[in-house]
């Protein structure tokens, strides 16, 4: 291709009658170049104006590499993180921004040619000429911008309309939400493209908060309505107004409301801040709702399952008139409070009670369908003005809820729950840090599998949450946000109405292999009842809120002030730390520490809890086994108090079960080749009595491929300074024991066992778009990256079980990863793998390999009992 104007995107207009897919040559419409303020609404500049005068030059620059810009449908050039979603920001526009005077040119919308980009080869020798030409043009623009003076049609500074801001959306706290801005007599939202914490800082100050702690993208707080006022906002953080930040111009956006930005502000108000800019919730929003218990005996008992429904109003709480109130409304309230169902309530009792109370009604005519996840989604009306005579014929709305099994109190509740829950549930949550959240897995054909996230929404997620005994859904998560599952993906395109009792009653499609991958596993976050567990634990001395010495409150009942004390570090490990981090609401445990002398920053010195032993699933340390009031701790000094380091994410290791089945075989290995293995305790104890170096050992060998399907890298607990060098095998051990290998009888008795120290944790292979991070060579860092796996081939030392002393019979082969919980994971229930094993003394047949929690309870029972009557030769 020669050096023509066409190669540079400067082609003349098409002949008459030909389709014109490119912008005709000539002056382009003036870009929106008004100052980025709350001033005059931006519109096309007049022909003689500064912006319009740049028409031909700007057109050449914008077209420089990619052809002229199209008439309509401008696409975003720069997406999140500073680069465009479909590549880097356009070259011409980037240079314009760089050399713009006063930053005003940054408002120029970036446009993309609809014509496919020419390949480099097709450009041939044009590349050099094009770059020279572009530099000449840029030089001209630079000189022209420096000398040209704008000729505004009117006054230079026109006072703009007053901006107002508010937080909206659900579910949220008072200091977070979707940002809505009132401009030009209309409320609108802000697009999340290029959004940064600096933008959030400016917006939070607008809203009366001292600072921002975070921001949210992709309409986390729900989609707004109306205009999207701002896009590609770029603040430095110190601006007094969002209007002083760079952006594309008011109302100039190519976003949808699925990209509405939100902010999380620090819960501290600016001293003396007047709420003139904040639109109160009474106008069109209901955010916070609570159940106020009025029965004296249950006032301190949690969870509160019955009471008067109240909504947050200014600095207090207001009631809802119950005229027209029905069970669907109660169902929505109970769902918000974390309860799966509602029940009838004794209105007469509350009527007598409320007659003696001074009431403040705010809402009336509430009408819900019962499928809403928040009261704000129902239709209702606000009382205006004086409410002293409001709700004349009614009383405050009262609701009574049925708690789920985890939160039921009293024998009556628990007995009823047991009757309802006969048989194994067909749905479960996996991989979540908190109770009521996780990847959704369903049981089908006796095998657990996941759900594909196509069409996954709050209605379907709420059906799952209520079926599991929680409330409605807070979030319906897509894209394997709670980690990837294993095994089959059972169903896709679930479309619940929200009224179903079970997910299995909803319409869905059966999956085909091409439809989905585990990167699309659906997950949920459910509303759960407030239990107050987080008020009974705290951390002290850490460098961040995610770490520190554990302090617990004791004796806080009956209105007494709690007494804070320390937890004995003896026996404190990963499982206990997991419960502590869950109770604190800080996610998963990274480490459970038995000594915390380096966090000695608190005046709490008394040890009040010892012997803590958790299973790992408890909601509070008080639910774990412990010594109670009889403290038993050898070292009661503060340096031996328990500590934790928490993390929002964790690894999750799984063994590739079918590879074990495919690679298992028997080898008779001569003793003279097993000296190193004996040194590492990879042979059974009877090997010590063998006639070394003569004879052999019978080994069951297999490959193991260990995947990290979690959301954080798996790293050995010990730092490299404490790794142990093994001279015989010439490598470092970063963990004492990484896996256990066992041969069990069908009733669970071990007849052969072995362990595998972490020879070296490294990324052997990774998924297509994942880069390796860890390798053993040259004392390298050890670990397994998310999306990678570590392969131990069947032909390396210790990748076996010594079965020399095992008699013929039917057995179970079991492999357990991370058996001592040395490293925290999001889910330990999938760390074991089991296979059926038939050994005739010469050959071995390994079959039915599966992850320990992959099958139904019934299938597992059948597996354990295989093959029925035991062979009488088994010892």
Image (cartoon, rainbow, N blue to C red):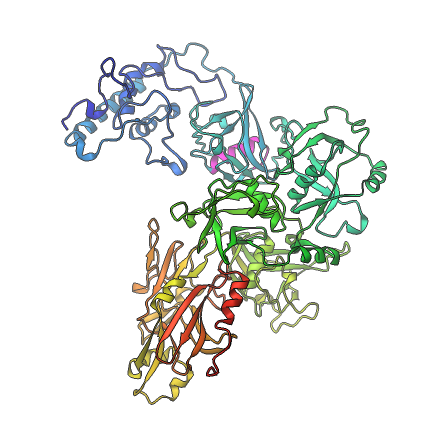
Q: Is residue 139 above or below residue 792?
A: above
Q: Nearer the viewer, residue 453 or 145?
A: 453
Question: Is residue 431 in sight in this rendering?
Answer: no
Residue 855 coordinates in the image, percent (x, y): 50, 61
Membership of 205 in magenta stretch: yes
Residue 317 coordinates in the image, percent (x, y): 72, 36
| Residue at the spot 58% in from the left edge and 32% down from the top edge | 167
Q: Is residue 858 above or below residue 531?
A: below
Q: Is residue 83 above or below residue 510?
A: above
| Residue at the spot 43% in from the left edge and 31% down from the top edge | 234
Q: Is residue 410 above or below residue 374?
A: below
Residue 366 coordinates in the image, percent (x, y): 70, 31
**On the rendered structure, is 796 left or right of 477?**
left
Looking at the rendered image, the quarter that the N terminus falls into is top left
**Corner quadrant of residue 701:** bottom left
| Residue at the spot 68% in from the left edge and 29% down from the top edge | 380
Helix, strand or loop for the magenta stretch, by majority: helix
Question: Is residue 116 in sight in this rendering?
Answer: yes
Membership of 40 in magenta stretch: no
The span shown in magenta is 197-210
**On the rendered structure, is 5 left or right of 616?**
left
Residue 468 coordinates in the image, percent (x, y): 60, 51
């Amino acid at each position: 291709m020669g050096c023509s104007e066409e190669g540079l995107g400067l082609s003349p207009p098409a002949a008459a009658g030909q389709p014109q897919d490119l912008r005709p040559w000539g002056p382009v419409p003036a870009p929106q170049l008004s100052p980025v303020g709350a001033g005059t609404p931006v519109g096309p500049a007049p022909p003689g104006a500064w912006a319009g005068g740049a028409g031909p030059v700007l057109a050449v620059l914008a077209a420089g590499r990619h052809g002229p810009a199209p008439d309509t449908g401008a696409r975003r050039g720069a997406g999140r993180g500073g680069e465009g979603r479909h590549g880097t920001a356009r070259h011409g526009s980037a240079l314009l921004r760089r050399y713009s005077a006063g930053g005003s040119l940054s408002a120029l919308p970036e446009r993309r040619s609809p014509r496919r980009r020419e390949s480099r080869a097709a450009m041939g020798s044009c590349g050099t000429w094009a770059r020279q030409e572009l530099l000449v043009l840029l030089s001209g623009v630079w000189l022209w911008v420096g000398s040209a003076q704008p000729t505004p049609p009117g006054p230079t500074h026109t006072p703009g309309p007053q901006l107002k801001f508010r937080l909206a959306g659900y579910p949220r706290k008072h200091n977070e939400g979707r940002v809505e801005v009132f401009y030009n007599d209309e409320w609108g939202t802000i697009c999340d493209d290029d959004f940064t914490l600096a933008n959030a800082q400016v917006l939070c100050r607008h809203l009366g908060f001292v600072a921002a702690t975070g921001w949210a993208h992709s309409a986390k707080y729900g989609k707004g309505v109306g205009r999207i006022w701002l896009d590609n906002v770029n603040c430095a953080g110190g601006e007094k107004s969002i209007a002083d930040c760079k952006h594309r111009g008011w109302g100039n956006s190519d976003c949808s409301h699925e990209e509405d930005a939100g902010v999380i502000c620090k819960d501290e108000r600016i001293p003396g801040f007047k709420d003139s800019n904040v639109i109160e919730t009474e106008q069109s929003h209901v955010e916070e709702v609570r159940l106020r218990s009025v029965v004296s005996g249950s006032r301190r008992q949690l969870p509160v399952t019955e009471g008067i429904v109240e909504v947050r109003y200014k600095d207090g709480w207001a009631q809802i008139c119950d005229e027209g109130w029905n069970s669907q409304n109660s169902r929505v309230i109970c769902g918000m409070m974390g309860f799966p169902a509602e029940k009838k309530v004794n209105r007469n009792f509350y009527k007598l009670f409320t007659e003696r109370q001074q009431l403040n009604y705010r809402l009336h005519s509430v009408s819900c369908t019962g499928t809403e996840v928040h009261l704000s989604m129902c239709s209702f009306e606000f009382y205006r003005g004086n409410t002293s005579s409001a709700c004349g014929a009614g009383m405050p709305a009262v609701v009574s809820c049925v708690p789920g099994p985890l939160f039921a109190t009293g024998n009556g509740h628990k007995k009823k729950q047991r009757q309802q829950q006969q048989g194994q549930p067909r749905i479960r949550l996996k991989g979540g840090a908190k109770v009521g959240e996780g990847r959704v897995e369903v049981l089908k054909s006796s095998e657990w599998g996941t759900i594909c996230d196509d069409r996954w929404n709050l209605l379907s997620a709420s059906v799952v949450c209520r079926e599991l005994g929680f409330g409605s859904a807070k979030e319906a998560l897509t894209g394997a946000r709670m980690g990837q599952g294993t095994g089959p993906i059972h169903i896709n395109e679930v479309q619940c109405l929200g009224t179903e009792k079970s997910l299995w009653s909803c319409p869905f499609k059966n999956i085909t292999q091409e439809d989905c991958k585990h990167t699309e596993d659906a997950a949920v976050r459910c509303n759960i009842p407030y239990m107050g567990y987080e008020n009974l634990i705290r951390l002290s001395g850490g460098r961040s809120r995610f770490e520190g010495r554990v302090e617990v409150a004791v004796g806080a009942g009956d209105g007494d002030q709690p007494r804070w004390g320390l937890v004995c570090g003896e026996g404190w490990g990963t499982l206990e730390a997991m419960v502590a981090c869950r109770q604190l609401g800080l996610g998963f445990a990274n480490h459970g520490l038995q000594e915390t002398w380096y966090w000695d920053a608190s005046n709490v010195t008394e040890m009040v809890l010892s012997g803590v032993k958790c299973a790992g699933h408890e909601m509070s340390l008080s639910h774990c086994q412990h010594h109670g009031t009889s403290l038993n701790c050898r070292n009661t000094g503060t340096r031996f108090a328990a500590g934790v380091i928490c993390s929002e994410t964790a690894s999750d290791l799984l063994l590739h079960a079918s590879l074990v089945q495919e690679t298992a075989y028997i080898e008779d290995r001569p003793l003279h080749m097993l000296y190193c293995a004996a040194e590492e305790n990879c042979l059974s104890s009877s090997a010590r009595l063998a006639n070394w170096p003569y004879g052999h050992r019978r080994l069951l060998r297999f490959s193991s491929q260990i995947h990290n399907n979690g959301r954080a890298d798996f790293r050995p607990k010990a730092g490299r300074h404490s790794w142990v060098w093994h001279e015989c095998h010439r490598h470092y051990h970063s963990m004492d024991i990484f896996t256990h290998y066992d041969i069990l009888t069908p009733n669970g008795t071990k007849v052969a066992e072995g362990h595998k120290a972490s020879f070296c944790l490294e990324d052997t292979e990774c998924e297509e778009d994942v880069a390796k991070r860890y390798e053993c060579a040259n004392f390298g860092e050890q670990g397994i990256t998310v999306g990678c796996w570590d392969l131990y081939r069947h032909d390396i030392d210790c990748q076996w079980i010594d079965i020399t002393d095992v008699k013929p019979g039917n057995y179970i082969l079991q492999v357990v990863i991370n058996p001592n919980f040395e490293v925290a994971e999001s889910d330990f229930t999938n760390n074991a793998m089991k296979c059926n094993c038939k050994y005739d003394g010469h050959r071995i047949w390994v079959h039915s390999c599966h992850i320990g929690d992959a099958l139904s309870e019934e299938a597992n029972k059948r597996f354990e009992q295989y093959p029925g009557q035991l062979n009488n030769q088994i010892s």
